[in-house]
Amino acid sequence: MKYLVVDDSKMARKMIIKNLSSLIEESSEIIQAQNGQEALELYKEHHPSICFMDLTMPVMDGFEAILKICTFDKEAKIIVISADIQELSMQKAKENGALGFIKKPVSEESLKSMLKTLGLI
Amino acid sequence: MEQEIILNEDEKDCLQELMNIAYGFATASISEILEKFATLSIPKINTISSKELNTYLNTKLRTNKKYYICNQLINGHLSGENIFLIDERSSYNLAKEFDLDENEIDENEIKDIVLEITNILSSATSGKLASLINATVSFNSPHITKIESLDQFDKRFESEYAHVIIISTELNFKDQHIKGELILLTREKSSNYLKEALSKVLEDL
């Protein structure tokens, strides 16, 4: 399976990958993008099973990227991992097509719980 | 001669991400109080020497505007000072968000509201940052002054903060025309503590 991790911070991507690694098969492939535009391009190229998306990013933010990915693929599974924890942001991300929202800092527990809730593991 | 503290690219990225989380937490608190949606900007990390502080602020303060400068002392592992800069117009708009009639809004009301917002923003940001790196902090009451030019900016900031890490973020309520900036000034020992803490976070990844 392929996973797409999108965040402008290298540290944030590392943190997500570290926590995700113990929950997925060793043979899984994790692709990384630094902004929404890159994410959209990589999504179209790789068709990942699940995409983990930050919201506040340069070039193209997560809200727009979610909308564009979900327009491209109506079955896209996108989970937001963000520090923007305002109710309206969570609501907007979901309206744009995200399935779930995890507040930063991400932990193995929060990832596991979300993936289980969505029936993705 | 004092020099700026050097953070490598990974440490800067790490601090930026931690500040992003801390500021997101603080903004959500303010947003909840005002019942207004705030646009989060990506925090900018700047390490400068104390002598460059004035130049930095010069780029931030517009000459034809009056500003409220609200500062709050921080004690503990991240000892230093948080400064919240907000222009007069934004302060007025902020006061209006608290359901005050126009004739009720005077300078004292505005100062009171800016003080309260600074208190929440500053303590939520620094408190959250501290919790993310297992540090402890406490806060003094914030103070507010109104300035009409950079010359009126307290020169004490330059002399007290030898190593300066400026973490600048904007509080931007898009439709309300409220724009402010939070600057965190850290003392030398706190800068070193922060650098070590960042290295540890990176090592653990």
Image (cartoon, grey):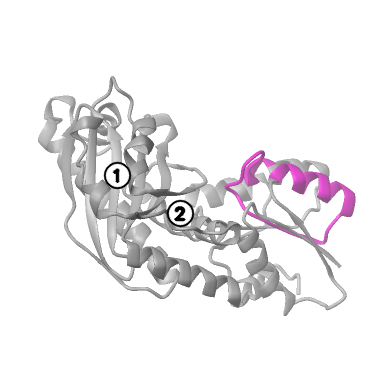
According to the picture, the residue beneath numbered tag 2 turns out to be B24
Q: Does residue B111 sit above or below B19 in this rendering?
A: above
- Tell me residue A36's x, y (percent): 70, 45
Extent of the magenta region: A36-64
Q: Residue at x 19, y 41 (%)?
A: B154
In which quadrant is the N terminus of chain A drawn?
Answer: bottom right
Asked which quadrant contains residue B139, the reply is bottom left
Determine crowd level at label 1: few under 14, some 14-19, many 20+ residues with C-alpha closer than 10 A: many
Q: Residue furthest top?
A: B64
Q: Residue furthest front?
A: B1
Q: Residue at x 54, y 63 (%)?
A: A104
According to the picture, the residue beneath numbered tag 1 turns out to be B84
Please state which amino acid type lies under the numbered disc 1. Phe
Left or right: B202 as drawn, with respect to B164? right
Labels in figure, total: 2
Evaluate whether residue A24 shows in this view. Answer: yes
Please state which amino acid type lies under the numbered disc 2. Gly
Q: Is residue A49 magenta?
A: yes
Label 2 – label 1 distance at C-alpha: 16 Å
Left or right: A103 as drawn, with respect to B72? right
- Tell me residue B2's x, y (percent): 35, 55
Determine crowd level at label 2: few under 14, some 14-19, many 20+ residues with C-alpha closer than 10 A: many
Evaluate whether residue B117 shows in this view. Answer: no
Q: Residue under mark 1: which chain is it in?
A: B
- Closer to the chain start, of discs 2 and 1, is 2
Report the disc number at residue A101: none
